[in-house]
Image: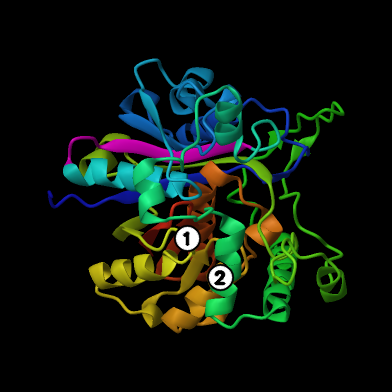
Amino acid sequence: MSNNNAYIVSAVRTAGGKKNGSLSQWHPADLGAKVLDELVLQTGIDPALIDDVIFGCVDQVGAQSGNVARNAVLASSLPESVPGTSVDRQCGSSQQAIHFAIQAVMSGTQDVVIGGGVEIMSMVPIGASIKDGYEAGHGLPFDSVGMKARYPGVYFSQFTGAEMMAKKWNLSREDLDNFAFSSHQKAIAAVHGKYFDREILPVQAKNAEGKTDMIFLDEGIRYDASLEALAGLKTVTEGGVITAGNASQITDGAAAVMVCNDAGLKKIKTDPRARIVAISVVGDDPIMMLGAPIPASHKVLKAAGLNINDIDLYEINEAFAPVPLSWAIDLKADKDKLNVNGGAMALGHPLGATGAKLMTTLLHELERRDGKYGLQAICEGGGTANATIIERL
């Protein structure tokens, strides 16, 4: 590896649109184009200097198929000379897109790369690529002879994994609901404090009702959230602890982060806002599926030469409440630094866009607090996880 540093120079996200909400009729390529254009606007860069656009997207079917990253470039103001490619590392897809961007600029083979993601879950539902492909007669992803031999009789399910995590870490339904409630409370406080204003790109509503006002705020936040209401929700499985209230929300959104090396900084003549300290990706138990942020975080801390108390803020995706809670127990992390402005239970989880969305929030919150280090990790289908440590400059 070369001695090139990797820096974040700009990061932006749309608000999270709730299921069938204000962003539900946006074409994914068009919403992706919006965040690309905004990065160019914020940095004042000549867009022809962008070496690549890498977008995460989980369900690459229908409107999200045909290489949505390239289609977002072609829907934007960027010139045709800018390529694009789409990646799927399940829920960590855009964190992986950012990692690929980081690796490209650190290698010195490219100088300016955008990593981001988009997912319009209202239009392309979760699991659509599996369901639509199966119904078209194209088989199932987990039907391989090798996988069945290795995991006989296993039905891979995130819900099963979330229940297994809660059990392993002795997390009660009350623990999960309390954390979900706090997610909404923190998000409400962030809205009142206008903390999201700098990171959210307002876009026009496009939905079935013909709504066209500008969307400035995440639509999933429940301003009337109560522990009583959360306690009243039915569990997904009988005798379980996971409910719709202590799991992430179906969400539409896009986010993108511009990354460059030292040569790139000279080209684009803008100041870096953060330095990439370390990145990691790991594989873990695919049956429990959601526990990999723990080993990924241990690995990235070791690579950075830091310990958990050196980190000022943690963004651990709230796919299900047991994920950040078990992570905090294992890493002995200060919960006051965890998802400080709320997480996916309140703000939503737009699958392929979530990694870049969280990175955008992490950067802006470090800046607001004058913090130094931030750590982000996301659990992913198949039992993998990415982790990233950034240093605010």
On screen, residue 99 versus residue 154, left or right, reads left
On screen, residue 201 versus residue 315, left or right, reads right
**Residue 260 in magenta stretch:** no
Measured from the top left, where is residue 389 in percent x and y?
36, 63
Question: Label 1, on which residue?
Answer: 287
Instruction: Locate the C terminus by quadrant.
Output: bottom left
Q: Which residues are magenta?
A: 108-120
Question: Label 2, on which residue?
Answer: 164
Q: Residue at x 13, y 52 (%)?
A: 3
Measured from the top left, where is residue 25 in percent x and y?
73, 28
**Secondary structure mostly seen in the magenta stretch:** strand
259 above or below 348? above
Secondary element under disc 1, as helix, strand or loop, is loop
Which residue is at the front of the view, 358 or 227? 227
Secondary element under disc 2, as helix, strand or loop, is helix
On screen, residue 105 versus residue 133, left or right, reads left
Which residue is at the front of the view, 34 or 284? 284
Measured from the top left, where is residue 150 in percent x and y?
36, 54
On screen, residue 308 versus residue 216, left or right, reads left
Furthest toward the left, the residue is 2
Visible in this render: residue 99? yes
Amino acid identity at mark 1: Ile
Which residue is at the front of the view, 187 or 120? 120
The disc label shown at residue 29, or none = none
**Residue 110 in magenta stretch:** yes
214 above or below 295? above
Amino acid identity at mark 2: Met
Give the tally of numbered discs. 2
Q: Residue at x 44, y 61 (%)?
A: 377
| Badge 1 vs badge 2, beta-carbon distance below 8 Å | yes
Q: Residue at x 44, y 22 (%)?
A: 78
Real-space CA distance between mark 1 and mark 2, rounded to the nearest whole angstrom: 9 Å
